Image (tube, helix red, strand yellow):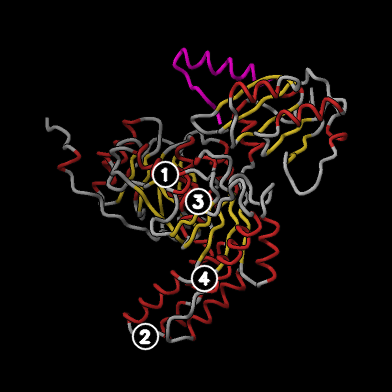
Amino acid sequence: MSSRPSPESTPPLLPLFADLRGRGVLVVGSGAVARRKGAMLLEAGAAVTVVADAPEPVLRAWIDSGRVRWLQGAFDPAWLDDVWLVVAASRDPTLNRNVAEAAHARRIFVNAVDDATASSVHVPARVRRGHLQVAISTGGAAPVLARRVRERLEAELDESLDALTRLLARERARIRWRHPQPGRRRRFFQGLLDGDVPHLLRARDHAGAQAAFEAALANDADAPRHGSVALVGAGPGDPGLLTLKALRALQDADLILHDRLVGAGILELARRDAERVDVGKHVGEDHDATQARIHALFLKHAHAGQRVVRLQGGDPLVFGRGGEELDFLRSHAIPHEVIPGITAALGCAAAAGVALTDRRHAHGVTLLAARGNRPIDHRGYAVGEHTLAVYMGAGELPSLSQTLIRHGRPPDTACVVIENGTLPNQRVLATTLAGLAALAREHAIHAPAIAIIGEVAAHAALAERCRRDATETGAITRAA
C-alpha cells in the first residue's frame, strides 16, 4: 500500500478561475455543505443539479423554484454525462469517494469535501469585491490557515475596489484606444492607481473619481496629483481598536501629523515611508501658535499633492481642535474627510467594565472637558442618575470633586479613574467623589486619564476584582 505523499513532495496546485455560466455541475449531498457549494455555483451562473434524498430547506426551496434540478436515488455514474464539474458533498465519505472515482474515470474535475486526495480541484478561500476576487489555497493541507489569511485580506481590501474594477472595465476600450502600446498602457494604469481615482472612490466621490479618470486619460504627461487631508481618530490607545478606514488612511498617507499621546503601536501600522511629525501640544507652550503651524502644514503639503493624515487620539471631533481644522480646510478648499475613532469615554469605560448608561443607574451621560476656554457651570452636572465622563482631568480632580459636591452631588458618589485606558499598563482606580483628591495624590495619576463619575462607576471595582481573580487562575486578564 503506497503512503500518502508529503506536502513538500507534492507540486503546487495551478490556480484557475472557471467560467461555469450555463455549464452543468453536479452536487451530491443534501446538507449545509452542499447548500454552501450550491450557492457559490449558482452565483457563478452554473446549471446546478443536486443529488439528494432529503434536501435541507434552502436546497428544497431552490428545487421548488426551479433554480436547480433534482435527482433522487442511489448515485448513478451516468448522471455525470454532460457535466463539467462534480462536487461530492454528502455526509458519507464512501459515497464521496465513489463519486470522485467515477468523475476521474471520465476526466471530469471533482471537488470531494474534506478529502484532498480524492479531489482534482480545490475550492479556495475567497475575498471578493465585486468582480475582483482573491483566492487563497493551501492545497487542502491547512484550510484554517487559508481562512485566517482571507480574514486579514478582508480587513485590508476595502469595498471601493469593486467600484474601481467596474470603472476600469467600463473604460477598457477607451484606455486601449488612447494607449495602444502595451508599455504606455501599463504606465497609464500605474499612474492611475497611484493617483487620485482610488482615493476618491474610497471617499465615495464617484463623480470626482470619474473626472480624475477623464483628466488622466486626456493627459499624455502624468497628471498632477491633488493633495488631501484626513482627520483621523486613533481611538483610545489599543491599536486593535483602530477602525479599518483609519488603518487604510494610514497606509495611504504621505505625511502623518500626530498627537503626542498617539502610541508607537498605532504609528507602526502606517506606510513605512510616510513622514511622521509630532504636532502634539505641551503644557506651557502657545497652543494657538502650534495649531497655526498644523494649519500651515495642511496647506503646504496638500498643495504639493500629498495625502496628509491628521492623527488624533480618540475621535478627532471630540475635545480636540478638529472643528477649527475643518474650518481651515473648508476655507482653503482643501479636499478632506473625517474618519471617526472610538472616543476615550467609550473605549476606557468598556475596558474598565463600566456601562456609561446602565438603565438601572443613569438616564444619560455627559462628556466634559475639565479645562477649556469657557467656565463650566457645574450646577447642571451635580444631579443624580447621570454619568459624567471627564476628559483632560488628571490635574483637575481635586477642584472638580469639591465643585461638584458644593453644587449638590453626594460625596459618596462612585467614581473611577482610568489611566492609560485599553493599554497593557492600564490602571483602574475606584473611589468616591470625596476621595478623588486623595486618590490623585496617592497614585500620582497622570495623562492620559479619564474620570467617570456616577452610580455606574461602582461596577468598575467589581470588574477589577474579577480581572484579578482571572489573572490568578491564568485566564484572560483584561477585556477591551
Hey, what amino acid is under mark 1?
Val
Can residue 211 be seen here? The reply is yes
Give the side of residue 162 with respect to residue 153, left or right.
right
Task: Return the x and y of residue 383 as percentages of the image width and height.
Answer: 86, 28
Hey, what amino acid is under mark 3?
Leu
Relative to 163, does residue 14 appear above or below in the rendering?
Answer: above
Of the residues under marks 2 and 4, which one precedes in the sequence?
A: 2
Could you give the CA–CA distance between mark 3 and mark 2, rounded to whole angstroms? 37 Å
Nearer-the-camera pick, 369 or 37: 369
Residue at the (36%, 42%) spot, across then down? 146
Of the residues under marks 4 and 1, which one precedes in the sequence?
A: 1
CB within 8 Å, label 4 to label 1: no
Could you give the CA–CA distance between mark 1 and mark 2, rounded to whole angstroms? 44 Å
Of the residues under marks 1 and 3, which one precedes in the sequence?
A: 1
Comparing labels 3 and 4, the label whose residue is closer to the camera = 3
Kindly identify which residue carries mark 2. Answer: 180
The answer to which quarter of the image holds residue 334 is bottom right
Comparing labels 4 and 1, the label whose residue is closer to the camera = 4
Task: Return the x and y of residue 79 as percentages of the image width and height.
Answer: 37, 47
Hey, what amino acid is under mark 2?
Pro
Of the residues under marks 1 and 2, which one precedes in the sequence?
A: 1
Q: Quadrant of the N terminus?
A: top left
Q: Which mark is residue 197?
A: 4
Relative to 317, does residue 336 appear above or below in the rendering?
Answer: below
